[in-house]
Image: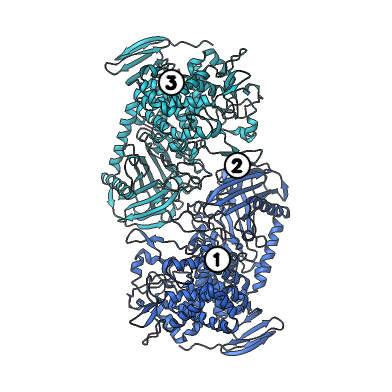
Chain colours: A cyan, B blue
């Protein structure tokens, strides 16, 4: 059972806890309490094994493809967390005997997992266990684990084995060749494994330190090696009151590590280097490397982003911290060749692939909070031009057609082709997104534009940004289909954001975004022509820009852009949506489990009903907000929201922001709370396959873009705060065009503190202010007319 | 806890049981109660999952190699046994709640696994469970499972899911590409998988029938598909007294099935055919296909071999039946391209590979009991000439050098190169057997000779046998090394049967067997030259027989054959054994766990001690018995047995027979009993990786060759019965040179019944008898002089 208020004192509202053990709901805390640092992600699986566990360790970017029938995925690296413990020969498990004071907690501030409880064995021996674990943010290759066991009532003999186990698979798929394994001095263990197709070498090193009552002990272990496994087996006796402590430090390095992109790689040197890293950490000792880790979190995250939320319900602050924690651990900020997985680094779900989730739901956080990381993520898409151009060419288009799912930048499209069972045919349902969910190409151009406008990073644009925007526009120009009868360009046979509608014509979101993408390219082309023609010349040969521009110019105005119907201002989501059958969705809406519709209908049948998986036009309203009036937004919200099951985790936060924009503050807050509960809430199975990365970005968006009202509009900063009435105030730091702004807002005052000598213009509810130093603005919220 | 007397009435001494559930010792009954029919082997894992289970299904001959660093192995086929059961939403597991009257039993007569118990759930609901399972001996592709659940105290809702799961691996190694999966009519499930390297297609089909209180019910299942998995999920309500029965029939076919060796193969046809087989079985119904299975066991096994053992301890009869059961289920009698695995089809141990275990320990059973099967197994070695000639050539030798471990006949050597941890270096120990354990080549020639002499199958010899004997002799002739100083041929740097001595010179067993092999070839060459020169002409071009014969003739007499020392008649096991250090072996001998020596020494150190893993010279005494006098046998038994740890399961039965030959009947019986306990005994972990196939052949050998005294000596039948004093009588059927003989023996009388019109000469304790019809011989046992 989840609990959110165990954190006390300086950790108040920093601690997420599960206070009752259940072997049937392990996935929940394994996922939402997972540890990571962008380099790797370690599911928070218990040391002792359980049947329903999913023991995963992923290292970003180590993609491998099992065979040509499967798509590439992040492989499950060898496990170092499992410890088989026996007490007087009995296997220790919380499923046996009895447990008291069980708490498993993630301390968000220290990024530490702690698990503690007292356990009475079936034979009546009582012990106190305390487990700690961290994945260092200071040394990205380092994992620390500590186990303390105190015998409370009896002299006991405790045995445990611990080592490195590369029998791990991704749901039965083995991604590694078995490599060398070795025990040095009966203490340091090394295991090498190599991915089968991408040939990434992974080297793991581990070492144990034992102490009793704080005094180091030397226990001779029995050494074990089996197929793909190496371990040490220890046993020792404890008297009542004795506490055994075992500290296990592990380092992980791979041949995909960034440095080997530039320098020559040799496995032998990697083995030495990684072992050296472990030896150095071992010399420092567990507590010291842990302190370095905590200091890194303060410096790189908490002090940097400087967030406070004062709400009547302290959960709101915790939820925001939870989001920021996850946005940090999921992001491979260290390497621009890597993107963010839709399930972060927390589970096998979506195979570590990157979707539009990054550009539309996550990058905004980094653009405002940590632009260097946003840049790295956009450079990942720049490197992805290789794969994206391949995809365009394979599909007979020009320019850059981004893959719906992306892995290693050169891979191109990696969306799997077959999904869940079709209840009518008994076969697997075909997944069309990799073929026809095409809006991502415009979404990426949009993210580049956002980044540029908010950071003013001209160098990025010159080197990477313009090329992305031009070449995506060229894709759209070649993608448009001329309708002779209507004398307009259409985009037919697509999947829009709402994935419950396949093979639709003129999805509003897709058409508007394609239009935006082309017009943006034209604008920059014209700008550069005047200001900086060398950039255009540099791109001319690569992109045939002159021809492209002609094509953009010729087509732009003829693109069909779905408009509000006269009678009710509803914008048709696509050409046929509004003509489809309406059914009672009561049974499927607001369920604890998503996708229940498919127990009754197959996708073909769902296609014929006015039901949406997620925000479609709503997300268009959010990202191209100036294209539509408040009245149109209101009318469409009222039409589409009741038909939207929010079966995608991307849906609720978008609706929360929209509702807030529309002045429906109670609804906005309740949608926000539902959004925070996607991972953090009481439902114990919804995060089994991993956290919902986009929804975590969505929590931040709801707070900063939604309640905080921070937006970039036409290249300018607009801040229209609309705090929930339960909130007293909100403050945080953002970056705006190279400067840091500290914002503080309550229900009537917005305080902006700039760096010295910085002065800028900000719009607040239609008024323009020049701000410099600390500026207090007393604002009057303007309600939306509806 | 094992129990052997639960069988009552016609099943007395036919039932092996475990009468207490323990999750820590699952491997024992999973292995020793495994089901099979030579086509496949199914570990007897519980339906409901446990953490420490090993859920395995193997189909003989479907070998696959994961990558070039690994050797080929029998892959773990998709699982069809797991059923996840919930009672009112609680997961059913015997680790929770309480269990009464637990029995898991293998009925050897019906080859049926039955598991039954009453279970009280943690919430107090009581249910009676009864599980049955068989792998059909009538339809080699068919598996039947039946589950009955009776609610005893409460109305309960029972849910279960069951299907086909191809996420299975061999200790983390995935051997299959994922194939198509499909549900037909919400009932018939089909899953296809294909091995990654050998490209064997496997098609599994399954269907469930549900009934309540004996009346068929139609329950609409929820269909599920996930990566490599497909299943149906059922739920229904039971009132107290209601019994739910679920029958699950499964068929398995592969592209390696024998018929496709001759006829064109198409996956689509295999899919249809395998589904057709399931539909036919479904129409017959579970109980009818079960009856056909039981009838096949009676006809093909029990009535055919017709064994009875009357012992004071009924366990002896059960142990022999257990051996015959296993010798039947382990043997791919249906396909001469397949051999017997050292762990049968019961576990991952030894990867399904065939060793000398087959020829020396298992084939004798088939030669005497079922010569057609013996022929099939020898033809497997004939097909293996391809791989064996490759191995000879690769090693710079002539002729045929059989692989120490064999898989698919053309594979050649498949022994892995690295084994357990070396406690001194911390690396894996190198396994030398694949390189230098060479006696197997002579062992196979020996088995061909035995088969020929006992069956008189001249056609086999003409087509296959002579070629094996000649070409193995040629290997040995090229393998011999001339020692100029001693003016003799030696065989240096080998591993003999005793694998605790590596890189030895002139291992007595190896040298004598090589000598036997060459002299046998010479004898047959000479015989054929006179009688049947066309055979020689046919082989001349292939084997360069004329040259070979010259070489045999020139070398045979100069082969060094280790002889008894003058002082004590001890034959040196090799050139240096007798000079090595003698240590106190008390600590390691007669332990419940084998290999404990390696907790204190590494293999290099063990090499320098007078300690043997297993029978070495003893096995030579058994198979070339006329080469050595009883006195020499006695002296060597007394010298070597105390130094032998019996760490190989091949050791005890050989010692039992030798002891019996030497008149040490008490010792023989006690060694026999220890041999029967290798799998069947109380030790609960020794069979985890699979049963010990050779030791099961050894049990039969101890009874028939040992106590029964049945031997082929120089081509003649000799029967010197020496029954244990605890035994009243013993009877069984054997085949001798084309005729069936029924034998019955007690402590003074041997009764032989021949088929009509058959008459033959038999030697009993030195006397010759002509027997025809029913012949009673009153014999007087002659004790050995020592």
Q: Quick one: quadrant of the C terminus of chain B?
A: bottom left
The residue under label 3 is A705
Q: Earlier in the sequence, mark 2 or mark 1?
A: 2
Q: Is residue A647 above or below residue A24?
A: above
Q: Is residue A764 left or right of residue B712?
A: left
The picture quadrant where one finds residue B781 is bottom right
Q: Please report, as a chain letter, where disc 1 is located.
A: B
Q: CA distance from mark 3 to mark 2?
A: 40 Å
| Residue B50 position in % (x across, y down) | 52, 51
**Residue B110: image location, x then y, percent:** 65, 64
Please give the chain letter of the residue carrying mark 2: B
Comparing B355 with B557, the one in front is B557
Does the rendering let one see residue A92?
no
Residue at 50% x, 32% y is A392
Q: Which residue is mark 1?
A: B340
**Horizontal and vertical percent for residue B658?**
49, 80
Check the image and report above or below for B348 versus B152: below
Q: Residues within 10 Å of mark 1 (few under 14, many from 20)?
A: many
**Residue with the mark numbered 2:** B224
Look at the numbered discs 2 and 1 and tell me whether their residues touch, using CB distance below 8 Å.
no
Alpha carbons under labels 3 and 1: distance apart: 69 Å
Q: Is residue A370 above or below residue B395?
A: above
Q: Is residue B193 visible?
A: yes
* Disc 3 to disc 2: CB gap under 8 Å: no
């Amino acid at each position: 059972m989840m609990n959110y208020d165990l954190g006390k004192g300086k950790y108040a509202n920093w601690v997420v806890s599960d206070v009752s053990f259940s072997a049937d709901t392990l996935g929940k805390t394994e996922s939402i309490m997972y540890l990571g640092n962008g380099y790797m992600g370690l599911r928070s699986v218990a040391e002792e094994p359980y049947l329903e566990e999913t023991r995963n360790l992923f290292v970003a970017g180590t993609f491998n493809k099992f065979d040509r029938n499967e798509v590439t995925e992040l492989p499950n690296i060898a496990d170092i967390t499992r410890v088989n413990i026996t007490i007087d020969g009995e296997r220790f498990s919380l499923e046996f005997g009895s447990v008291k004071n069980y708490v498993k907690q993630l301390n968000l501030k220290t990024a530490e997992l702690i698990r503690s409880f007292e356990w009475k064995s079936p034979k009546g021996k009582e012990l106190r266990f305390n487990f700690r674990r961290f994945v260092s943010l200071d040394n990205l290759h380092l994992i620390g684990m500590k186990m303390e066991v105190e015998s409370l009532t009896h002299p006991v003999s405790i045995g445990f084995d611990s080592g490195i186990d590369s029998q791990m698979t991704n749901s039965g798929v083995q991604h590694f060749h078995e490599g060398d394994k070795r025990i040095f001095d009966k203490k340091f263990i090394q295991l090498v494994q190599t991915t089968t197709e991408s040939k990434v070498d992974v080297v793991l090193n581990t070492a144990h330190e034992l102490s009793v009552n704080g005094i180091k002990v030397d226990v001779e272990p029995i050494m074990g090696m089996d197929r793909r496994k190496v371990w040490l087996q220890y046993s020792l006796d404890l008297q009542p009151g004795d506490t055994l402590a075992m500290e296990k430090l592990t380092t992980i390095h791979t041949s995909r590590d960034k440095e080997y992109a530039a320098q020559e790689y040799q496995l032998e040197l990697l083995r030495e280097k990684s072992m050296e890293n472990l030896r150095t950490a071992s010399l420092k000792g567990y507590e010291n490397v842990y302190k370095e880790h905590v200091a890194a979190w303060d410096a790189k995250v908490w002090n940097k982003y400087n967030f406070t939320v004062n709400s009547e319900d302290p959960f709101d602050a915790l939820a925001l911290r939870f989001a920021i924690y996850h946005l940090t651990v999921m992001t491979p900020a260290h390497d621009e060749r890597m993107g963010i997985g839709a399930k972060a680094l927390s589970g096998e779900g979506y195979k570590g692939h990157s979707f539009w989730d990054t550009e539309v739901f996550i990058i905004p956080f980094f653009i405002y909070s940590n632009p260097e990381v946003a840049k790295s993520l956009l450079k990942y898409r720049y490197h992805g031009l290789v794969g994206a151009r391949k995809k365009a060419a394979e599909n007979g288009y020009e320019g850059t057609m981004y893959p719906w799912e992306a892995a290693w930048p050169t891979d191109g499209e990696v969306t799997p082709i077959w999904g869940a069972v079709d209840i009518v045919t008994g076969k697997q349902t075909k997944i069309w997104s990799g073929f026809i969910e095409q809006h991502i190409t415009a979404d990426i151009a949009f993210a580049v534009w956002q980044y540029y406008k908010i950071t003013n990073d001209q160098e990025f644009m010159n080197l990477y940004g313009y090329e992305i925007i031009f070449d995506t526009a060229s894709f759209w120009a070649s993608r448009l289909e001329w309708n002779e009868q209507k004398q307009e360009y259409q985009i037919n046979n697509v999947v829009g954001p709402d994935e419950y509608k396949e093979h639709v014509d003129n999805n509003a979101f897709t058409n508007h975004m394609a239009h935006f993408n082309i017009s943006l390219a034209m604008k920059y082309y014209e700008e550069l022509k005047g200001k900086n023609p060398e950039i255009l010349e540099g791109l001319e040969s690569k992109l045939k820009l002159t021809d492209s521009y002609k094509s953009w110019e010729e087509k732009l105005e003829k693109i069909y852009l779905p408009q509000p119907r006269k009678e009710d201002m509803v914008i048709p989501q696509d050409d046929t949506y509004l003509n489809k059958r309406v059914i009672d969705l009561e049974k499927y809406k607001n369920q604890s489990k998503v996708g229940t519709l498919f127990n009754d209908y197959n996708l073909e049948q769902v296609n014929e009903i006015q039901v949406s998986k997620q925000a479609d036009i709503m997300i268009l309203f959010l990202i191209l907000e100036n294209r539509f009036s408040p009245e149109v937004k209101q009318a469409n919200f009222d039409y589409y929201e009741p038909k939207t099951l929010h079966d995608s985790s991307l849906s609720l936060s978008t609706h929360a922001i929209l509702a807030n924009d529309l002045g429906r503050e109670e609804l906005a807050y309740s949608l926000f709370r539902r959004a925070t509960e996607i991972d953090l809430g009481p439902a114990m199975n919804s995060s089994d396959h991993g956290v919902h990365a986009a929804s975590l970005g969505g929590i931040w968006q709801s707070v900063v873009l939604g309640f905080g009202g921070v937006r970039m509009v036409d290249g300018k900063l607009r801040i229209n705060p609309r705090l929930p009435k339960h909130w007293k105030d909100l403050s945080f730091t953002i970056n705006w065009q190279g400067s840091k702004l500290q914002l503080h807002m309550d229900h009537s005052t917005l305080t902006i503190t700039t760096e010295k000598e910085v002065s800028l213009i900000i719009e607040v509810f239609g008024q323009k202010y020049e701000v410099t130093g600390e500026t207090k603005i007393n604002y009057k919220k303007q309600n939306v007319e509806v």
